[in-house]
């Protein structure tokens, strides 16, 4: 492998990493917001026993 090809590969590696860091987000998380409480509180532990 020649020196110029190695140098090109290093530049492509770092430029790809920089583009991924500073590029737009590709997360596909759903927009959920606040979820309502649907369970029942535990009877063994109550907050009023302080």
Image (cartoon, rainbow, N blue to C red):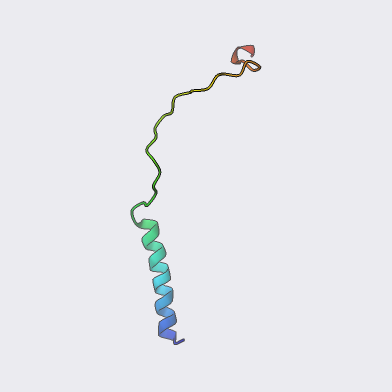
Q: Residue at x 49, y 23 (%)?
A: 38
**41 up-or-down from 24: above or below:** above
Q: Position of residue 43 (x, y in %)?
A: 63, 15
**Residue at (43% x, 28% y) in the render:** 35
- Identify which residue is drawn at 57% across, 18% down: 41
The extreme top residue here reads 48
Vertical order, 27 against 47 (above or below): below
Q: Residue at x 40, y 43 (%)?
A: 29
Q: In which image quadrant can residue 7 be found?
A: bottom left
Q: Is residue 3 left or right of residue 44?
A: left
From the viewer's perspective, tell me whether residue 28 is left or right of residue 38.
left
In the figure, 35 relative to 41: above or below? Answer: below
Of all residues shown, which one is farthest toward the bottom? 2
Q: Which image quarter: residue 11?
A: bottom left
Locate residue 39, reporting x and y percent. 53, 22
Q: Seen from this angle, which residue lies furthest left?
A: 24
Question: Residue 6's spot in the image, x, y percent?
Answer: 44, 81
Give the quadrant of the C terminus.
top right
Quadrant hosting residue 2 = bottom left
Image coordinates of residue 27 in percent, x first then y, are 39, 49
Count of number-bearing discs: 0
> Depth check: 27 or 13 in front?
27
């Amino acid at each position: 492998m020649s020196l110029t090809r190695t140098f090109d590969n290093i530049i492509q590696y770092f430029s790809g990493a920089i583009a991924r860091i500073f590029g737009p987000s590709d997360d596909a998380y759903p927009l959920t917001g606040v979820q309502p409480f649907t369970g029942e509180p535990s009877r063994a532990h109550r907050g009023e026993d302080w």
